[in-house]
Structure formats: C-alpha cells, structure tokens
Amino acid sequence: MEKKDIKELTRRDFLKIAGAGAVLTGAALAGCKPRNKVSAEGGALGDVPTDKMEYRVNHNTSDKVSLLGYGCMRWPMRKTSGGGEEVDQDAVNELIDYAIGHGVNFFDTAPPYVRGWSETATGKALKRHPRDKFFVCTKLSTHRGAELQTFQGSRALYEKSFKDLQVDYIDYYLLHNIGISGMQGLMQRFYDNGMLDFLIKERIAGRIRNLGWTFHGDVKCFDYLLAQQDERKVLWDAVMIQLNYYDWKYATGMNTPAEYLMGELEKRNIQAIVMEPLLGGRLARVNRQGLKLLKETHPEDSAAKWAFRYAGSHPNVLTVLSGMTYLEHLQENIRTYSPLERLNGPEYEVLEQVAEILNDSNYIQCTECQYCMPCPYGLDIPGIFRHYNIIVSEEKRLKSSKDPNYDKYRREFLVGYDRAVPKLRQASQCNSCGRCKPDCPQRLDIPKEMLRVDKYAEQLKQKMEF
C-alpha cells in the first residue's frame, strides 16, 4: 500500500483497504477481512486479525486491557475553508472504529494534545461505541499554567475532560508529568491545593476507576509518590513511564533509566502504561548499523516491530501506547500484538547491541511530543529535529567537507530541509529565548540544539570546509 496520510483517503478508499464494515461498530467488525498485506516499510505481512489481540488483566479491577493502546496525541488534521487547520473527525472516527473492531480497547488522551482538540475528537469517536467496549485515559495537565494549579483551575480542567470526552466516568485518570517541575511543582500542583485529596474522593465515588500518574523529569518525585503508597497514604493503580530498549539503560537528560522505574513499580505490584516505545519514532528508523543487526535476525521484521515486541514483553506492562496517524501503522501494530511473540534471550542481546550503537550516535534526543509547541516565533521545533535525526539514522550526517559523498548528502539535506520545514520556521529563525525549555520532558537544551542544526545547515549552504 502506498504510504499516505489517512486524511487523504476517501471513504471508498478506506473501505477498500480496511475491508467492508470497517466503519461499523466493533461487533459488526468481527467478520471483516482487511486486504492490506503490506507493512509501513513495504514488506508482505498478511491479513490483519480481528480476534487475536493480546490482553493484560488490571490487578485492581480485573479489566482486560488490550496490550496495544491507542495514543491520541497526533490525530490527522485537515485544512479549513479559512486556511487554518482542524482535526479530521471523519478520519479519527474511522481509525478508532478500525482499532476497536480489531481488539484495541485502551485510548489515551490529555487536554493539551493536538492543540487542545484531542479529548473532544476522541470523545466524539468513542461516543459512537458502547461504553463497555473501551477504556479511556486522560490526565490532569496543570503543568502549563499557574492558573490551572489552583484548586478551582484544576477542578475546572478535570470537569472539562468529562464534558469533552462525553463520559460520566474516566477509566484511568493520571497526574500529568509529575517530575517536570521538581518536588516544588509536585507539591504546588497536587498537594498544597488539595486537588489530590479531591481526586481520591472522586475515585471512591466511582467517577475515576483508576488513579495514577505519568512521569518525566526529577526522579525524586517518582520516588516520593511511591513512598506515599508504601505508607498507605495513597493507592496508585497504574503509572505511565517512558520505556523502550534504548531508555532501559541509556535514558538522557532528566529522564531516568526505565530499568529502575520498572523495578520500583514491580516491587509494589503497580502496572506500567508504556509511552514512547519508539522513542519519538527514532527506534523505527535506527541507523544502518543497527538495522543490519535486526535484519540479520529477522529479515522480514521492521525496526518498529522489534521495539513494540520489546515493550510488550515485560510482564508488568498493562498496555503499550502508540500514536497511529496512518492506517498501515495501526494495522502493523495490531499484527504485532495479535498475539505478541515475546522476545527470547538472543533477541534481547541483539537489542542491547543496537541500543549501544544508538547511544554512540549523533541523535538529538527529541521524541516529537509537541510539548514545546507552539513556538512564539513560529519555529517547527519537532520538524527541524526530525529532519536532522533522519540523516543521522541514514548515516548521511557529514563529518567532513572532504567526504566522497559530500555533494550528494549536502544536496539531500538542504533540499529535504526546505521541503520538510518552511524557511521561516527553520532553526535559523531561533533567537534562543528559551521559552520552550521548561516544557520539554526530555530536558533538551532546545536553543543549543537549534544552534547545532543551524550551524550544520549553514556549513552546507556556504560550502564551508570542516
């Protein structure tokens, strides 16, 4: 199948690809036979199973949760008549229908996702299905404004999620980014204002079925909340962590190795919800040296499949989130978890070698989460870093102007840069204001990385010797 944005598919195209009935209810979808037999990388894969999804049992509620969870951070967009953009609700409906029809029942969103539109778009799509066919997860995202951190502001955000999602209870409600502003921010956002006490009462009342948190940043916050459970002050039902075969040992910035995080959760029998299994897409486009190792072991498997198998192979994982904007990515991930083929010892060793290779490379550690956006000066921060990381993964990042491939790789970078990122949104426009830095979960020095990309681009534009 030709790779194209789902928003460009007509309804007839979608039905042809997905199989008759793909936009009906989950029950009606049980008998559909999708015709797509091509992966996101172009390899032959076979039909997409409708009844083989692997499920994990929630220790507290006994809910059967699909191992593949749908991350709703990057819904398809379309142009409006006024020249702006909006969520393509038809495409969202079709993707969610297809997911539910193939066994996916966990949907993760948050108030800031998709410029603030994710909860509404997700709610509209899920409302068309019986409430017992899905679990919805959202977050108390008060890290982006002091006005949200008062009790009144936090409660208003909480109640707005119910309205936007069109539900009368939330299956998983998480304190968002608990480590991003350190212990002081943790206390201010959830303890000093009484909001956590309120949420605990809401769980008792049944409006929240599972209470937990998501973690980036200062590990002292992670340890503190677990100590709260040890002291029987708060019961945590689930915790969302960044887990993949690179972050297991080599987490960068203020992130903590997932090996430690998972170990602490396992001690307390708290299940993990996995975010960033592909590390912002980097593990789907590993460099040639790493990809060679993967292909020598499983020639037909994509790099993404390796990463998803890794994340799902941990027994303490409840669900693995993937933000699937493209239909073929959704189909490939369904295949991976229908059912999951757990990694064996030699396969773990291969991924350890690939992680070591990636750790020695020149990547910018961006996961394209969009938390830094919008930039007040119009820069496409994730797009800039994505283009740079692609040339690193393809081993086309020139280290010398005397490289025999200089002319070819120079042209590829500059032409690709202009196509991927409009000139007025490129790194050269950064004035190092630093407003983006506090919002980055990876704790990147974004202005410094912008200077790195711009310096490299200027070297190529001016044909400087280096």
Image (spheres, rainbow, N blue to C red):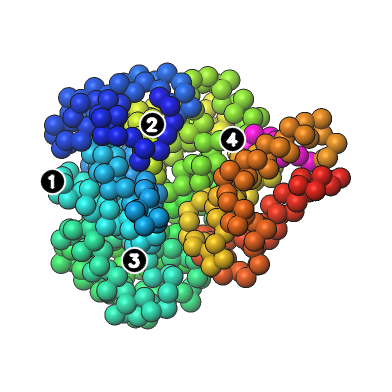
**For mark 1, does the 10 Å Cα neighbourhood hold few (<14), some (14 to 19), or many (20 or more) residues?**
few
**For mark 4, does the 10 Å Cα neighbourhood hold few (<14), some (14 to 19), or many (20 or more) residues?**
many
Q: Report the Cα–Cα distance between label 3 and label 4.
A: 34 Å
As helix, strand or loop, the secondary structure at mark 3 comes to strand
Q: Which residue in the structure is indicated by mark 3?
A: 140
Residue visible at 54% across and 52% down?
Answer: 382
Indicate left or right for 150 with 436 as reference: left
Q: Report the Cα–Cα distance between label 1 and label 2.
A: 26 Å
1 vs 2, front mark: 2
As helix, strand or loop, the secondary structure at mark 4 comes to loop
* Residue type, label 1: Pro
* Residue type, label 2: Glu
Question: Where on the picture, by quarter, is residue 205?
Answer: bottom left
Q: Between residue 136 and residue 430, name the one nearer to us.
A: 430
Q: Is residue 337 above or below residue 322?
A: above
Q: Between residue 421 and residue 341, name the one nearer to us.
A: 421
Question: Residue 25: horizontal and vertical position, in percent?
Answer: 15, 37
**For mark 2, does the 10 Å Cα neighbourhood hold few (<14), some (14 to 19), or many (20 or more) residues?**
many
Marks 3 and 1, the one that precedes in the sequence: 1
Q: Which residue in the structure is indicated by mark 1?
A: 130
Look at the image and say whether residue 163 sits in the magenta stretch.
no
Q: Which residue in the structure is indicated by mark 2?
A: 328
Numbered badge on residue 286: 4
Look at the image and say whether residue 397 sits in the magenta stretch.
yes
Q: Mark 4 and mark 2 in contact (Cβ < 8 Å)?
A: no
Marks 3 and 2, the one that precedes in the sequence: 3
Residue span colored magenta = 393-399
Q: Report the Cα–Cα distance between label 2 and label 4.
A: 19 Å
* Residue type, label 3: Leu
Question: Where on the picture, by quarter, is residue 427?
Answer: bottom right
